């Protein structure tokens, strides 16, 4: 695949991911704490060390859009697709870097051959 096409696809995928996939998970946060915040209807930005150990009085029944405190099947599907697209995008970027490295190597080999021919002509 041509590098410009890969770049265009990568950009399109990036914009799609940013526009349509909600940010559900936070890096570095244990899953049990994320689940506890959902069960207790705590703000998603709340840190564990600021929690008083009690759930909000309105807690019960899970969050709107979630079934039983977990992600719905549609949300799981979207997260799975986002993960697959992210992996594909990352692979594309790695391939592009490998292609650039190979092109640099070939250019260096051509330059070395030219230098050898030049020195042989002297």
Image: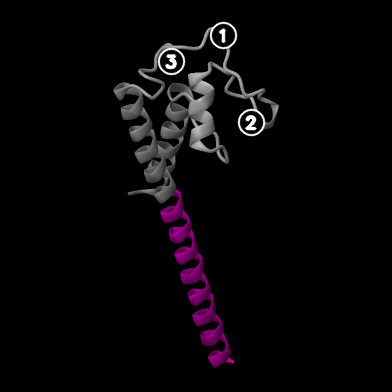
Instruction: Name the spot of residue 83 as percent of width and height, x first.
Output: 39, 38
Q: Is label 1 or label 3 in front? A: 1
Q: Is label 1 or label 2 in front? A: 1
Q: Which residue is mark 3?
A: 62
Q: Residue at x 54, y 32 (%)?
A: 33
- Mark earlier in primary sequence (3, 2): 2
Q: Residue at x 70, y 26 (%)?
A: 50
Instruction: Name the spot of residue 106 as percent of width and height, x first.
Output: 46, 70
Are there few (<14), some (14-19), or many (20+) residues within 10 Å of tag 3?
A: some
Q: Can residue 68 be spotted in the picture?
A: yes
Q: Residue at x 53, y 38 (%)?
A: 30
Q: Which residue is mark 2?
A: 48
Marks 3 and 2 sit apart, C-alpha to C-alpha, by 19 Å
Image quadrant in which the C terminus is located: bottom right
Q: Are marks 1 and 2 in contact (CB under 8 Å)?
A: no
Q: Is residue 73 above or below residue 101?
A: above
Please tell me whether mark 3 sits on a helix, a strand or a loop: loop
Q: Which residue is mark 1?
A: 57
Per the rendered image, the range of residues in magenta is: 93-122
Is residue 17 shown left or right of residue 116? left
Query: Which residue is nearer to you in this view: 82 or 109?
Result: 82
Please tell me whether mark 1 sits on a helix, a strand or a loop: loop
As for residue 115 lying within the magenta part, the answer is: yes
Marks 1 and 3 sit apart, C-alpha to C-alpha, by 13 Å
Query: Which residue is nearer to you in this view: 8 or 113?
Result: 8
Name the residue at the top extreme.
Answer: 58
């Amino acid at each position: 695949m041509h590098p410009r096409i890969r770049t265009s696809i990568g950009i399109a995928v990036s914009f799609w991911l940013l526009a349509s996939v909600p940010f559900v998970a936070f890096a570095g946060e244990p899953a049990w704490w994320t689940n506890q915040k959902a069960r207790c209807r705590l703000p998603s930005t709340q840190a564990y060390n600021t929690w008083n150990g009690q759930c909000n009085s309105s807690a019960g029944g899970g969050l709107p859009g979630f079934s039983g405190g977990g992600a719905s099947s549609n949300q799981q599907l979207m997260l799975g697709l986002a993960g697959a697209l992210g992996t594909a995008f990352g692979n594309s970027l790695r391939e592009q870097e490998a292609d650039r490295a190979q092109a640099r190597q070939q250019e260096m080999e051509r330059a070395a051959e030219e230098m050898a021919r030049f020195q042989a002509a002297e």
